[in-house]
Image (cartoon, rainbow, N blue to C red):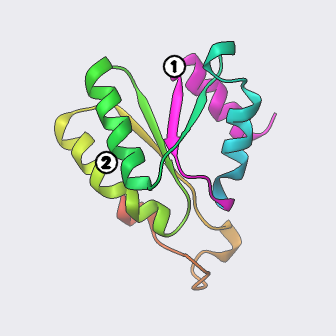
Amino acid sequence: MKLADQLIQQLIDAGVERIYGVVGDSLNPIVDAVRASGGSAKGGIDWIHVRHEEVAAFAAAAEAQVTGKLAVCAGSCGPGNTHLINGLYDAHRSGAPVLAIASHIPSAQIGTSYFQETHPDRLFAE
């Protein structure tokens, strides 16, 4: 079982029914695992495609605030990560239980000025 499959299974076990996000190359393993889960109608997770990662984070925060349950958003590497910040900041300040799946560039490329390299550990420090 791949790491992405394990992550999705853990989210299913935690009661997560959907992930809000924008598909991107660095998120492909997660999106594939969500698709393989069969969707919420079959006990899996639905992928809710949004127009922008900021919307994904705000949607997850709103769901978490309304339900009180863990909600999830996802952003691909680089700009996808930075676009999550406003919604995640809102979730943090309101105490909404939100998990952000923030993908990253290949490990071997970190620190090489790789295309769309950011520093998620610093971006999401707060």
Mark 1 surroundings within 10 Å by alpha-carbon count, few (fewer than 14), some (14 through 19), many (20 or more): few
Q: Earlier in the sequence, mark 1 or mark 2?
A: 1
Expressed as whole percent of the image width and height from the top left, the position of residue 44 reads 65, 21
Image quadrant for the C terminus? Answer: bottom left
Expressed as whole percent of the image width and height from the top left, the position of residue 90 reads 22, 45
Expressed as whole percent of the image width and height from the top left, the position of residue 114 reads 61, 81
Up-down relation of residue 88 to residue 38 (above or below): below
The extreme front residue here reads 51
Up-down relation of residue 50 to residue 110 (above or below): above
- Which amino acid is tagged 2? Leu
What residue is at 66 percent from the left and 25 percent from the top?
A: 9
Spatial CA span between label 1 and label 2: 20 Å
Q: Is residue 22 left or right of residue 52?
A: right
Please tell me whether residue 90 belongs to the stretch shown in magenta.
no
Query: Over which residues does the magenta segment extend?
Result: 1-25
Name the residue nearer the viewer: 46 or 28: 46
Q: Is residue 33 left or right of residue 99?
A: right
The extreme bottom residue here reads 113
Q: Please, what secondary structure does the residue beneath circle 2 have?
A: helix
What residue is at 52 percent from the left and 29 percent from the top?
A: 18
Please tell me whether residue 2 belongs to the stretch shown in magenta.
yes
What residue is at 66 percent from the left and 67 percent from the top?
A: 107
The extreme right residue here reads 1
Look at mark 2 in the image and give the residue it sits on: 88
Name the residue nearer the viewer: 33 or 117: 33
Look at mark 1 in the image and give the residue it sits on: 14
